[in-house]
Amino acid sequence: MEGRLGISDFHLLVITSLTGGALKDSDRRILDQCAARIGLSPTEVGRIFKDYAAGVVPLLSPMSDKQRQKLLRLLVSVVAETVDVRAARDEVQLVARVGSAFGIEKRRIKSMLQGAAERYDPSQAPPNARLRRDRD
């Protein structure tokens, strides 16, 4: 699939997010926002997370480089609109894990995050945006 992102793309995003172990609350919030942008309902997202928690993982078809780039751009965009990436350690680690799992070079990931940091405008951030480093 080369067009819109869909449920299988979200599954891949969740799987790659889990490469670092259990998801943190901050990871889950970012993934929930990505799912909303893709057009998934909260019920679908809840079922997906429940399945993964129970060890039920769908068989996914390979994704093109173009789709992986598109999915990573979505993740970076959501992170950039939610937190100040200069201070948001957990969210930056999530982007780095996913980008690495997608085979995207570290310097490209860093460049995407730097661009996001330059575009971050706290006055446009959602009310629950965090401007400092979290303490988990």
Image: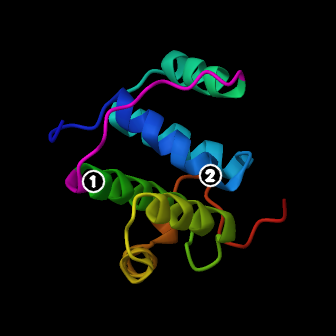
Residue drawn 70% across the image and 46% down it = 23
Where residue 111 sits, quadrant-wise, is bottom left
Left-right relation of 133 to 18? right
Please state the extent of the stretch shown in magenta in the rendering: 54-66
Name the amino acid type tagged 2. Answer: Thr
- x%, y% of residue 4? 21, 37
Residue 34 to residue 113: above or below: above
Whether residue 64 appears in magenta in the rendering, the answer is: yes
Q: Within 10 Å of the Cα at label 2, are there few (<14), some (14-19), or many (20+) other Cα atoms?
A: some
Left-right relation of 55 to 115? right
Query: Is residue 80 among what the camera can see?
Result: no
Outermost residue toward the left in this view? 3
**Comes first in the chain, label 2 or label 1:** 2
Residue drawn 54% across the image and 37% down it = 32
Residue 128 to residue 46: above or below: below
Q: Mark number for residue 70?
A: 1
Residue corresponding to mark 2: 19
Query: Is residue 99 among what the camera can see?
Result: yes
Q: Give the dominant element type of the magenta stretch: helix, strand or loop.
A: loop
Residue drawn 23% across the image and 49% down it = 64
